[in-house]
Image (spheres, helix red, strand yellow):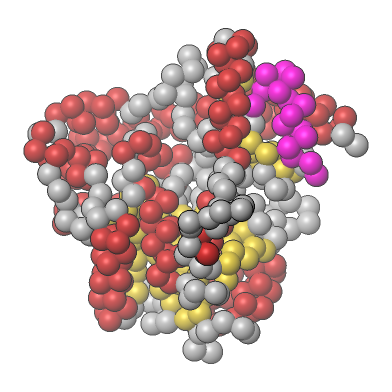
Amino acid sequence: MANSMAASHAVNRILKDAIFEANAACKVAIKKYGAVKVTNATIGTVLDDSGKLFVLPTVEKVWREIEMSDFMSYAPIDGLFDYRNKIFDKVFRSPTYNGFFSSVATAGGTGAIHHAIANYAERGDSVLTTDWCWGTYNVICRETGKNLETFKMFNSDLTGFNVQAFADKVEQLLKVQNSLLIILNTPAHNPTGYALTSEEWNQVIRIIKNHAESGKKISLLIDIAYIDFAGDSEHAWDFMKKFGNMPANVLILVAYSMSKSYTLYGQRTGALAAYSTDPDVMEEFENTNKWSCRATWSNINCGAQNLFIKLNNDKQLRAEIAKDQKNIRELVNNRANIFVKEAESCGLKTVPYKGGFFIAVPAENPKAVCDILHSDLIFAVPLKLGVRVAVCSMPTEKITGVADKIKFAIDSLK
């Protein structure tokens, strides 16, 4: 660039978001060929079988009942008091922890991740996550002066979480850093649909505690954006019971989003929740993250926070929401089952799927695979390690045959 007015750290920033670029290409095809002929497997929102955005009926009903003043008023910088309290109940499920809790309202789950990276990783240090991951983690790291390091998420035969790779990378980073922020997106991982098993969680926690004993500070951020649509909803939250009695130098952070759980994507409301056995760490959490809220968005959507409060204060509404979420979960799981069954039949390798919006297909040249799919008017997202297929946005009748087309595309490039 010959001329630039941007600060040196901001020069040459050009955002390339594979998800939104793929969705934009899909929209162009829809305008040209019509929605009936196009298969949209790009975006992380649930579309019904007619291709329209699926909105939870109970959310829409209660949304329309909220007083106008509860929409238009400023919320406190760190969020409405009742909202933050209800987040505790929603996220931690009131287990018998020996410790302290806090939370702050954020601009969706993305805002929660932003605050965690901004405040719990040193500038110039590395943040650790899986190699299959949501690309925005890296964008936030770069925005805040951090590096994103990854470890191989799955073992060699793609049957489970690679605990050894995780352990090796944690050890490597803590040899050169005094602290480490780890991000794990589970259950219903984006982009693979994977969920850590109970034993895998036990091993992860054991590794973290072992390093904490040496005096290292470790923050574990669990991104649960898709948890309400994990395959086994009854037990999806069970792992949250494992974090009691952590060392004082281990901080548990949880990024919660209303976008997916309440089909409230555009209202940008979520929370960063935290647990520690040290009350000083919790006081610091509240002060630090309140500062970051004021410095970024000032305060969060008041209407959406009041919606969350109303929905979670009323036993009947909670039951209605659970039923609505079950309907979406069954719709998406049915689509996923069709895709996985057809993938197995045609020999298409997929990453182990356990629930959620996406299925991942390993590929050596993901962009080329997606380009070939375009000839059949099928649009998916090319990632570094493979192709992300959003079964959440594909009408059920369009699922059939997609796995075969992806297999053909991959084979044609060999």
Residue positioned 64% across, 26% down in the render: 379
Residue 23: % across, % down? 56, 30
Residue 328 falls left or right of residue 270: right
In this picture, is 354 found above or below 374? below
The quarter holding residue 93 reads bottom left
Q: Nearer the viewer, residue 195 or 169?
A: 169
Q: Looking at the image, which residue sits at the far front?
A: 3
Q: Residue at x 30, y 61 (%)?
A: 295
Mark yes or no: residue 36 visible.
no
Q: Is residue 65 left or right of residue 406?
A: left
Of residues 213 and 78, the one drawn nearer to the viewer in this rendering: 78
The correct choice, above or below, for 258 with respect to 140 in the image is above
Left or right for 100, reference 346 = left
315 relative to 198, above or below: above
Q: Position of residue 233 (x, y in %)?
A: 44, 43
Location of residue 308 in the rendering, given as x and y in whole percent from the top left corner:
23, 43
Q: Residue shown at 24%/55% (left/top)?
A: 298
Residue furthest bottom as drawn? 214
- Decide whether residue 406 is among the magenta residues: no
Q: Which corner quadrant holds the C terminus?
A: top right
Q: Where does the magenta region start and end?
A: 364-379
